[in-house]
Image (tube, rainbow, N blue to C red):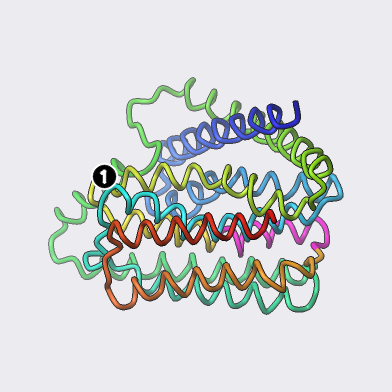
Amino acid sequence: MDFILACVGLVVLLLAGDALVRGAVNLSLRIGIPALIVSLTIVAFGTSAPELLISVSAIREGVPGLALGNVIGSNTANILLVLGIPALITTLHVTDNSTRASYLQMLAGTALFIGLASFGSFTWVSGLVLLAALAAMLTHAVYEVRCHRRNTAMACLETIAAESAVEDLEGADPDLPWWKIIVFLIVGLIGLPIGAELLVNASTNIARELGVSETVIGLTLVAIGTSLPELATTVMAALRKQADVAFGNVIGSNMFNLLGIIGVSSLIGELPVAPELMRFDIWIMLAASLLLGVFVLKKINITRVWGIIFTALYVGYVVSVLL
């Protein structure tokens, strides 16, 4: 019964998160907020909303290990699984994308996260530091895009690029009526806390029944579930030969998980770092991040063979956590 409730909670989370993204994106574009700002803030928040709500619920329920396990497990899954499975379908052409700067920012965010974790817990001070780093990265991204647009010679090209950005923005629909926007927002805002509550309570019960810690459940069951939106997006990007979208999705999600979700969660309550996380799981997350760097920095395409290796590495990691 708990497993069924966990699945129901996960489905509610995913559907509510998608509804919130669609409603927020279209509302923002209707009131004149640029597509760039929407994609960097509202979409990033909306797609990570399930992880955020799970972390908040876990703190309220007194199981902070589930919150940290979810974020660390999701980041590992985002690299090995979310990039591994699409590579089984088609080659991800790294040579055509320009995610070097974003990757280095993600690596810096990972190093900051590990440095703060080494103190034994994430406090409100840690939260402020992480959120400040996230704000700096978003500010830099906005500045870079504005500089790029200023260097564009022809105004018509800027207009076409802006229109294309709106069309490619996840959930954007210029013809969506106001009443649907409101419904999407209400469904998202109501569904997210309900889904999070169901998933956290059911996952906690499953952990107790199996004799494992809530941290392990967060690293595996919950992490895989909350990585499904990123997986779906990356598979579609791979099929459309948009490797930059696939890598951007993973890199952006990982940055927001570490800096935004843990940052906000630390302001709500202290997050003690379990010893097993510092001994093993955090370093696996770092190793996966460094492995991704080989492909991004050296411009090596992720072929089907690498897809098999990535997926096998993730399966091996999950098995080692559960045993």
> Which residue sits at x=29%, y=47%?
89
Q: Position of residue 217 (x, y in %)?
A: 71, 49
Q: Residue 4 lies in what quarter of the image? A: top right
**Residue 188 shown in magenta:** no
Which quadrant of the figure contains the N terminus? top right
Task: Estimate the x, y position of residue 224 in percent, counting from the top left.
Answer: 57, 47
Residue 257 is a magenta residue: yes
Classed neighbour count for the residue bearing mark 1: other residues with Cα under 10 Å, few (<14), some (14–19), many (≥20): some
Q: Residue at x 68, y 54 (%)?
A: 322
For label 1, the residue is 239
Q: Indicate the secondary structure of the residue bearing disc 1.
A: helix
Q: Main secondary structure of the magenta part?
A: helix
The residue under the point 82% across, 47% down is 211
Q: Position of residue 280 (x, y in %)?
A: 67, 70
Residue type, mark 1 in image? Leu
Q: Position of residue 273 (x, y in %)?
A: 78, 67
Please tell me in which quadrant of the rendered image residue 259 appears: bottom right
Q: How many marks?
A: 1
Q: Nearer the viewer, residue 183 or 103?
A: 103
51 to 197, vertically: above or below:
below
Q: Which residues are magenta?
A: 256-271
Q: Residue at x 63, y 50 (%)?
A: 220
Question: Is residue 168 visible from the viewing direction of this image?
Answer: yes
Direction front: furthest residue? 323
In front here: 202 or 207?
207
Is residue 124 in view from this perspective?
A: no
Quadrant, the C terminus = bottom right
